Image (spheres, rainbow, N blue to C red):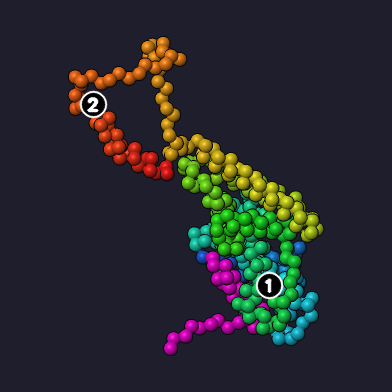
Amino acid sequence: MTTTAVAPHPTSVLELFAISGETARALAGADRSAWNGHIIESSSAMLGLAHWDGTLYLDRESIVDPLRHLYEHAGAKRPTRTLIAYRESLATLLHEHAHFLGPADATQEAAREAFTKLGSRQLEEGVTEAWAQDHLDDFIHRLGIDKVAPGIDSVRSDGYYAAFVPAIREITTDLDTRNGLPPGETLSLLNRQTAAGQFPLLVDFVYDSTRLPDLEPSGTDTRSRLESILRSGLAHLEAYELDPPGLATKHSHATAAQILTHLHHETHTTEATYSFSQPDPCALPHPARRIPSPHEAALSGVTPPRPTQPSAALHPAVLPPAALHPAHTRRSPASTRSLESCG
């Protein structure tokens, strides 16, 4: 019998770090990770940093030390506050690894250039944090940490980027519904992209959720207009980044509602433009106006003369066939099909 080897769960913080990148990549379903395998303990205001060269920086006091403590006291019962500290450290680890994810042909150079464009940071940080929050328990279970720190999957922490995450959740949830996708699918697909691929994919989701793919010819600037709405709207979230979490969340929801309203107005207006400009194939043509002859005009308002009896000299054979057999009048196949198709 053939068996599949199962990787053992890490028993130290070094083992945890060694397999954390591949665990995050597999969990996300991404093609590749740009992580180079190096983790540097830092002492700065940043909890974590996914550097463009592939190096992962983690704050020693806030991230690395709690994870060391986790394995040094494996299996022991911890207070809720300690479990939350563990959980937040693991959330940061997963978040930073998610920044390294991308498709097979992605490059860090292209991602870095795209990240500097309007709205890109807000989109990537919002997507990365929302996805990491949603998949943290699965990350913990895959690493076996729920056995090392019992109860860690029963506590919750607030997470970060309160100005970005609610807006990203509202927009991606709306697109899931409009495109008939499972809940969370849009968010997961965006998370598998680098900054270079996220906005093009997001615009595709918006565009494909409308009737425009069936109405609009190629070469229009509709996608550019949709991207402009998304970029300017998401960039506006930066104004709330330093607000208290509750206020930032409120502003984020309001901004998402404005973005969605603007997008829907833009797409509906464009749809209407093409809908009204297309001729209706089932509409009958306007009847041609026949100009009356001078004789008919002169008799207007006068009782029409009675039809005379047909002359005996006329032979029935000279009459049009339709006059003899009106029920058997033939229509051309084309005209018949056009009428049938409008039924």
Q: Nearer the viewer, residue 111 or 156?
A: 156
Q: How far apart are marks 2 and 1 (CA)?
A: 95 Å
Q: Is residue 53 above or below residue 255?
A: below
Q: Which of 100 and 329 is in front in this view?
A: 329
Asked whether, in this view, residue 27 is left or right of residue 240, the answer is left
- Asked whether the viewer can see residue 261, the reply is yes
Mark 2 Cα within 10 Å, few/some/many (few <14, many 20+)? few
Residue at x 19%, y 24% (from the top left corner): 315
Residue 12 drawn in magenta = yes
Q: Name the residue under label 2.
A: 319
Task: Please give the range of residues in magenta.
Answer: 1-30
Which of the numbered marks, if any, corresponds to residue 90?
Answer: 1
Q: Secondary structure beneath disc 1?
A: helix
Residue at x 68%, y 83% (from the top left corner): 148
Asked whether, in this view, residue 66 is left or right of residue 117, the answer is right
Q: Secondary structure beneath disc 2?
A: loop
Looking at the rendered image, the disc whose residue lies closer to the viewer, 2 or 1, is 2
* Image coordinates for residue 214, horizontal then vertical, percent: 48, 46
The amino acid on which the numbered mark 2 sits, given as a three-letter code, is Leu
* Image coordinates for residue 338, horizontal then vertical, percent: 37, 40
Which image quadrant is residue 132 in? bottom right
Which image quadrant is residue 111 in? bottom right
Could you tell me which quadrant the N terminus lies in?
Answer: bottom left
The amino acid on which the numbered mark 1 sits, given as a three-letter code, is Leu
Residue 145 drawn in magenta = no
Q: Nearer the viewer, residue 205 or 21?
A: 205
Residue at x 55%, y 56% (from the top left corner): 179
* Image coordinates for residue 73, horizontal then vertical, percent: 73, 84
Residues at circles 2 and 1 in contact by the CB criterion of under 8 Å:
no
